[in-house]
Amino acid sequence: MSEIPYKIYLSENEMPKSWHNIRAVMKEPHDPMLHPGTLKPCVTEDLLPIFCKSLAEQELNFTDEFIEIPEEIRSFYKMYRPSPLVRAYCLEKELGTPAKIYYKFEGTNTSGSHKLNSAAAQVYYAKKEGITSLTTETGAGQWGTALAMACVYFGVGLTVYMVKVSAEQKPYRRYAMETYGAKVVASPSDTTESGRKILAENPGTGGSLGCAISEAIETAIKTQNCKYVLGSVLDHVLLHQSVIGLETKAACDMYGIRPDVIIGCAGGGSNLGGLISPFMADKIRGKNDISFIAAEPASCPSLTRGTYAYDFGDTCRTTPLMRMYTVGSSYIPSPNHAGGLRFHGMSPILSKLYHDGYISAKSYVQSDVFAAATLFARSEGTLPAPESAHAIKAAIDEAVKCRETGEEKTILFGLTGTGYFDLTAYNSYNAGTMTDSVPSDEDLEKGFAGLPKV
């Protein structure tokens, strides 16, 4: 076995040529997406008013384990991929742990996160089908930034509805999106019927991803030659993000690295789903016994305290219904700093894997998350995004357990992006003004009470 360097890079020629579709491997598929009007399983035609045809077909593909990545997308990927798999030697030393810690670093592109992997794919398919503009939502801004980059590259217009509290906390994200040519609207806004309705019912609200999705979908439907694209949750997004896991597995195989634990932060599920996809396929086939951990915010605990039920993906209840772990589409989480993890539900794929016992989940309050982020930054040198720091916190906890027990486990986590646009949050932590918010059972019951009767 070769000596393991700090950073493992694949060559361009070793980059995946196909995405991995975990649904084709799962022993039992997740329950079908339902049409909101008929409550019957969606077919491709049901999704076309909102999505491009190619993406709708990918969303409903449960049979093909590998789906070819078009050459135009692979060419785009080559600008920033393959991304490195990093051995966290300095963090290991700081923790005094016998564990080996690795992280797949997705923050090497200008958007600062893994979101560009699906953004490039979705915009490519839109352009190929003759779509001239797109709408979307964004929480912390990573997805909006990535989509703006992809849209200007392929020559497609873009309107981004950014969760209002994130727009206020992270104005530089808006500036970045606007630099790439996107129009950015703080959501909820008075520019759509959905936004006006939400504001009337919740005056002064900081918004949520569910609110922003409602506005983006409404705009897409009412705008000629325009479609809506989503940065997480949906099956085709996890498909595109599987490039992360495929590269990671190739790097592990190259150096004989055998992870015992794989960890990812979880909001809607795109990065975790992409990271674990090929490893999960092997686990389902009985080829490994890896423990998979989803790390989520205590302020929006869809896996750890949610319920497994059919729910809408947006606040105004316009999307198809998906069976997932959810705290209810009407739930608006506290305005914490992990904007990308504030979605009320979880990917149907990850929800099913969690429900069937293939994944465990942990939730953390943000002050503990930022303590872990700060420790990581001071030892490894990279300032992590607040979302990514949830995975760091879980990885540190696992490494500390190894220190206490003497186990020499191999821990791998996803570092989804950088936190250089999140310095307001770091300042809050450093100044001791950061607060933690955890919903009460009564708060969650209000969200559950609004679940559709399916």
Image: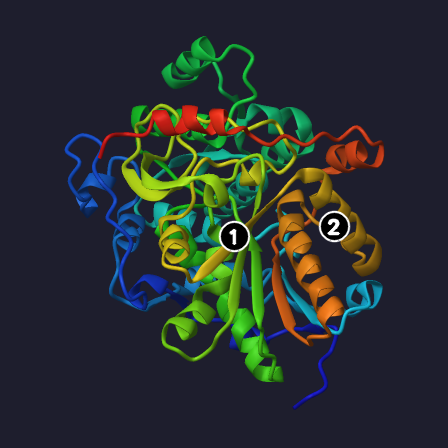
- Is residue 387 shown to the viewer in this render? yes
| Residue nearest the observer in this picture, 166 or 172 | 166
Q: Residues within 10 Å of mark 1 (few under 14, many from 20)?
A: some
The mark found on residue 268 in the picture is none
**Vertical relation: 70 (above or below) 344:** below
**Helix, strand or loop at mark 1:** strand
**Helix, strand or loop at mark 2:** helix
Q: CA distance from mark 2 to mark 1?
A: 18 Å
Question: Where's residue 93, x and y in %?
Answer: 83, 68
Q: Quadrant of the N terminus?
A: bottom right
Residue underneath mark 2 = 372
Residue underneath mark 1 = 361
**Vertical relation: 335 (above or below) 131:** above
Residue under the point 40% across and 35% down: 133
**Vertical relation: 420 (above or below) 246:** above
| Residue nearest the observer in this picture, 195 or 36 | 36
Residue under the point 42% across and 75% down: 282
Q: Residues within 10 Å of mark 2 (few under 14, many from 20)?
A: many
- Is residue 420 shown to the viewer in this render? no
Residue under the point 37% across and 15% down: 193
Residue kind at label 1, given as amino acid type: Ala
Query: Seen in the image, is 69 located left or right of residue 385?
Result: left
